[in-house]
Image (spheres, helix red, strand yellow):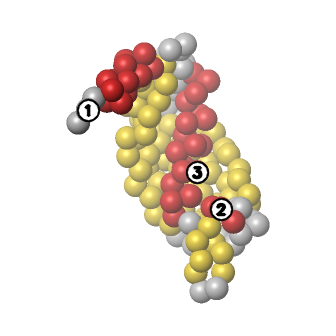
């Protein structure tokens, strides 16, 4: 995590497959839930190479604006930028484009975790009878 720096960027591309769409006016278009996943994945891939062994990351929040439709079969591109570091909390600005225009933008927060503590907490929840 020591190598993370404000201003780092990562770009990711997807093809809009049918499983990533919703139906609008008879057309299959990139859905907002899929765009949210896309924003998270672009940010995740920016951070992953900088983590120490035993560290992971989880999403905290996503504030997304879906600005325009993208039809099935077209490419989308997410451009993620790390804009804030507050101890283990990371803040990203992400812009999403298709081949024609900007189709989305988001602010996303992620948190760097210790995987062993996370797994222990999860295991206890799984084993609880509540």
Q: Which mark is first along the chain, 3 or 1?
A: 3
Give the side of residue 28 with respect to residue 83, left or right: right
Q: Which mark is first along the chain, 2 or 3?
A: 2
Please tell me how crowded label 2 is: few (under 14), some (14-19), or many (20+) other residues with Cα within 10 Å: few
Residue 110: percent from the left, percent from the top? 43, 36
Q: Which residue is mark 2?
A: 19
* 107 is higher (above) or lower (below) than 90: below
Q: Which mark is first along the chain, 1 or 2?
A: 2
From this viewpoint, which residue is outermost toward the left? 130
In the figure, residue 91 lies in which quadrant?
A: top left
> Which residue occupies 63% across, 39% down?
10
> Which residue occupies 58% across, 71% down?
22
The quadrant of the image that shows the C terminus is: top left
> Which residue occupies 45% across, 20% down?
115
From this viewpoint, which residue is outermost toward the top? 53
**Do we see residue 99 in this rendering?**
no
**Do we see residue 19 in this rendering?**
yes
Please tell me how crowded label 1 is: few (under 14), some (14-19), or many (20+) other residues with Cα within 10 Å: few
* 50 is higher (above) or lower (below) than 109: above
Give the foreground label among 1 and 3: 1
Give the foreground label among 3 and 2: 2
Q: Name the element at disc 1.
A: loop
Residue 117: percent from the left, percent from the top? 37, 18
Q: Nearer the viewer, residue 17 or 36?
A: 17
Give the foreground label among 2 and 1: 1
> Which residue occupies 55% across, 13% down?
53
Give the side of residue 24 with respect to residue 87, left or right: right
State how far apart marks 3 and 2 are (Cα). Answer: 13 Å
Q: Which residue is mark 1?
A: 129
Residue 38 tag number: 3
């Amino acid at each position: 995590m020591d190598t993370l720096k404000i201003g780092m960027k990562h770009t990711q591309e997807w093809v809009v497959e049918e499983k990533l769409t919703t139906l609008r006016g008879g057309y299959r278009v990139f859905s907002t839930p899929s765009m949210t996943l896309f924003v998270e994945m672009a940010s995740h891939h920016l951070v992953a190479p900088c983590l120490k062994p035993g560290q992971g990351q989880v999403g905290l929040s996503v504030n997304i604006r879906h600005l325009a439709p993208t039809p099935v079969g077209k490419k989308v591109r997410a451009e993620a930028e790390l804009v804030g570091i507050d101890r283990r909390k990371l803040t990203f600005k992400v812009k999403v484009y298709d081949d024609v225009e900007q189709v989305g933008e988001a602010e996303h927060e992620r948190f760097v975790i210790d995987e062993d503590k996370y797994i222990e907490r999860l295991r206890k929840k799984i084993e609880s009878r509540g």
